[in-house]
Image: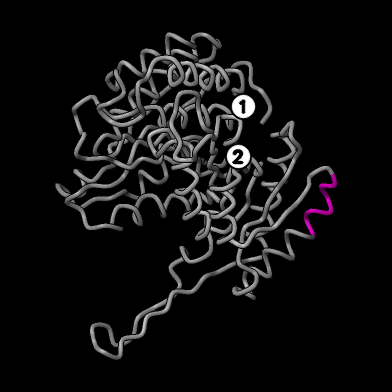
Amino acid sequence: MTAITSKKLQIAVIGGDGTGPEVTAEAVKVLKAVSKLEKFDVQFDPFDICGNRYLQKGITITDDEMAALRRYSSILLGAIGHPDVPPGVLEKALLLRMRFEFDQYINLRPVKLLPGVETPLKDKKPEDIDFVVVRENTEDLYTGVGGCMKKGTPDEVATQTAVYTRKGTERCIRWAFEYTRKRNNPKGKLLTLVAKTNVLTFGHDLWMRTFQEVAKEYPDVKTDYNNVDACCMWMVKNPEYYDVIVTTNMFGDIITDLAGMLQGGMGVAAGGNINPEKGGCSMYEPMGGSAPKYTGRNVINPVAAINAAAMLLEQEGYTKAAERISRAVSVVTGTKMKSQAAGKMGYGTSEIGDLVCENL
């Protein structure tokens, strides 16, 4: 992204369910503080889209709301998921709909162990766990192609078809090469394709062929390949090997949760659903979910939401502001917080936001 010196940044804010509004409030607080330091204007427009509204009115998201959100380049999301709403209802109607209709074809998941944050990997330090997963976000098993026959009988047949296109595959792979080049890892630029070409011999063959063809245009980027099961093994054994991983939608969904635990848990993990095209609408969110049992108690960890805000700024071109937030978060996790677990941080949710602001 090209650095931006001044303009008005308009952000749509969806606090959502459970603790989502609480962590989002801290991310907004930090964004306001850093905008003053970096001297740019930022405006936050709230959208009441959540499980409570669905329970009261039967509305997930309207076409008018979708049209309004499309006009923003960035959405900051807290969490979607309500214990009284059946699983999948809100996720499909809100998250998947936005990913598909806004063509957010890149899911970006930085995996970075912050100072002071515990990892389940013995003797691994922040310099050992610092890589990025680029996940294709609009194809594969998530397209909803499939069906059911003789449902509820002993002869039931269910199919779920993975869909891969050359266009969808290539644009994701090409974006990953560009990102690897810009990331410019001092240990060497390395892009690893994760798939399962030895078994999934049609769709993943398309991924491999496309990866090899696009790689010819990036001679400065070293390439590698892992079967997904091997990646899960090596990610735990030698996370320091990885720089950038590019992978399919389904496998990306799985390995990013593993990666999230390596970086200290979902309380610090953030992700972006990105449409990189000009005029595209992207959405940034913490990965921890709505955590309803902690709602309103001021004990939930807002670091992931604040990291999501830094991602938003980076992709919008406010690189210096994003770096300020990242450095401040590292100071807070490394010198202030006792733990990343809810209720054990040594501070309340709002106090963590204040500490980040103080260290910008």
Q: Is residue 207 above or below residue 128?
A: below
Amino acid type of the residue tagged 2 in the rendering: Phe
Residue 129, quarter of the rendered image: top right
Q: Position of residue 307 (x, y in %)?
A: 47, 29
Alpha-carbon neighbours of circle 1 within 10 Å: few (<14), some, or many (≥20)?
A: some
Q: Count residues near mark 2 (Cα–Cα under 10 Å), then give few for <14, some for 14-19, many for 20+.
A: many
> Which numbered disc flags the more N-terminal residue, 2 or 1?
2
Secondary structure beneath dot 1 equals loop
Outermost residue to the front: 123
In terms of image quadrants, where is residue 40?
A: top right
| Separation of residues labelled 2 and 1 (CA atoms) | 21 Å
* Residue denoted by label 2: 131
- In this picture the colour scheme is one colour
Q: Is residue 79 left or right of residue 324?
A: left
Farthest-out residue, left = 56
Q: Residue 353 has which mark?
A: none
Q: Residue at x 45, y 23 (%)?
A: 116
Q: Is residue 59 above or below residue 9?
A: below
Give 125 or 144, whichever is nearer the viewer: 125
Identified at 53% across, 34% down, the residue is: 123
**Residue 86 locus on image (x, y percent):** 22, 58
Q: Position of residue 302 (x, y in %)?
A: 36, 27
Q: Which mark is residue 317?
A: 1
Circle 2 or circle 1, nearest the eye: 2
Mark 1 residue type: Gly
Tell me the quarter of the image containing the N terminus.
top right
Residues at discs 2 and 1 in contact (Cβ within 8 Å): no
Along the viewing direction, whichever of 227 and 272 lies nearer the viewer: 227
Tally of numbered discs: 2
Residue range of the region highlighted in magenta in the rendering: 213-219
Q: Within the image, what quadrant is residue 292 found in?
A: top left
